[in-house]
Image (cartoon, grey):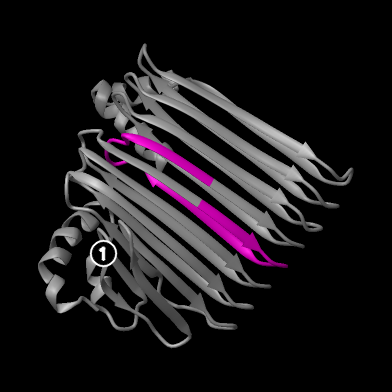
């Protein structure tokens, strides 16, 4: 629940949390696990039976520990909101997440930095899934339109036997500013992972994304997918990497970059490494302009060019 002294601060964050697509009312329910971080403090939290939640303030940020006990299956998504309402500053968020054997949980995370002009946010998330555990993590960002936000988001996940992990990062509703995303997943025997990043760049935004699958266990499988829509003078460098280290491991990496603008500078690097002859890895990568036929079809139905582009982008980045 919301700490009494931080009600007004919560209301400010909640406004932008809603704009980013979240439902702020979830933070007021006692049957939902939730955490609200503002600057270097936790201003609200709630947990339920079977979920252990700890937090402490650190220099320029907070450190969180969340553990779902063996066999516990959380019906409602776990809600995390990280906000910073000042135009300048630095924020560090460290998150340690563990799911016990056969535990299941879904996470919805929203990071809102609507005032940032010279602001840097760094997040490091360490994730451990025990045997048969299942976890999905959706991370949605909402930045200022000044382009003055710098974000570094690092995800390190370790998957034990027959566990399932899905991780998505979306920044599609506002300017990016400067963004660096790193997703690294180590998979054990018959573990499954799906990781995805979707970003919409404008003006002079700059993006670096690295997605990596380490298929270490027999019959482990994974997909790493990146979609970037780059416009104006934006830049992007994407690396999708997979290692087939065990028999019958299967991995696929995919990158799609759509460009619009004469000064766009984007690049993609697919990397496949096989250490076991029975492993199989595939990749798909493309860079190019928007589908002209699709654009013309929408314009023929009465949409202006910009309206048609926005509709196509929304569908692509949904």
Query: Is 313 within the magenta?
Result: no
Q: In the displayed structure, does residue 82 sit left or right of residue 64?
A: left
Residue annotated with mark 1: 23
In the rendered image, the vertical position of residue 208 relative to residue 318, given as above or below: above
Which residue: 56% across, 73% down?
Answer: 99
* Residue furthest right in the image: 277
* Residue furthest top in the image: 262
Which residue: 64% across, 78% down?
Answer: 101
In the rendered image, the vertical position of residue 139 relative to residue 244, given as above or below: below
Q: Secondary structure at mark 1?
A: loop
Q: How far from the left and from the top, in percent, is residue 20?
A: 27, 52
What secondary structure predominates along the stretch shown in magenta?
A: strand
* Residue furthest left in the image: 8
Residue 90 or residue 109, whichever sits in front: 90
* Residue furthest front in the image: 59
Which stretch appears magenta?
155-182
Q: In the displayed structure, does residue 279 sit left or right of residue 118?
A: right
């Amino acid at each position: 629940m919301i700490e009494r002294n931080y009600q007004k601060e919560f209301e400010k964050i909640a406004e932008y949390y809603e704009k980013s697509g979240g439902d702020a009312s979830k933070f007021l329910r006692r049957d939902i696990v939730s955490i609200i971080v503002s600057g270097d403090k936790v201003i609200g939290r709630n947990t339920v039976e079977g979920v252990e939640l700890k937090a402490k303030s650190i220099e320029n940020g907070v450190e969180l520990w969340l553990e779902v006990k063996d066999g516990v299956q959380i019906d409602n998504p776990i809600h995390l909101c990280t906000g910073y309402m000042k135009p300048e500053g630095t924020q560090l968020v460290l998150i340690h997440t563990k799911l016990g054997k056969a535990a299941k949980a879904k996470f919805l995370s929203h990071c809102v930095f609507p005032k940032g002009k010279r602001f840097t946010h760094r997040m490091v998330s360490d994730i451990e899934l025990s045997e048969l555990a299942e976890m999905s993590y959706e991370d949605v960002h909402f930045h200022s339109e000044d382009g003055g936000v710098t974000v570094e988001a690092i995800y390190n996940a370790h998957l034990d036997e027959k566990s399932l992990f899905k991780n998505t990062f979306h920044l599609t509703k506002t300017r990016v500013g400067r963004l660096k995303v790193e997703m690294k997943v180590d998979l054990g025997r018959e573990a499954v992972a799906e990781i995805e990043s979707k970003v919409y760049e404008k003006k002079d935004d700059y993006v670096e994304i690295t997605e990596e699958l380490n298929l270490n266990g027999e019959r482990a499988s994974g997909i790493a997918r990146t979609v970037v829509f780059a416009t104006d003078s934006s830049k992007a460098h994407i690396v999708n990497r997979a290692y087939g280290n065990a028999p019958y491991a299967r991995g696929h990496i995919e990158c799609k970059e759509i460009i619009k603008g004469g000064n766009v500078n984007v690049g993609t690097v697919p990397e496949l490494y096989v250490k076991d002859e029975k492993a199989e890895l595939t990749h798909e990568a493309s860079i190019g302009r928007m589908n002209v036929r699709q654009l013309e079809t929408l314009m023929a139905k009465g949409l202006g060019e910009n309206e048609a582009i926005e509709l196509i982008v929304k569908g692509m980045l949904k």
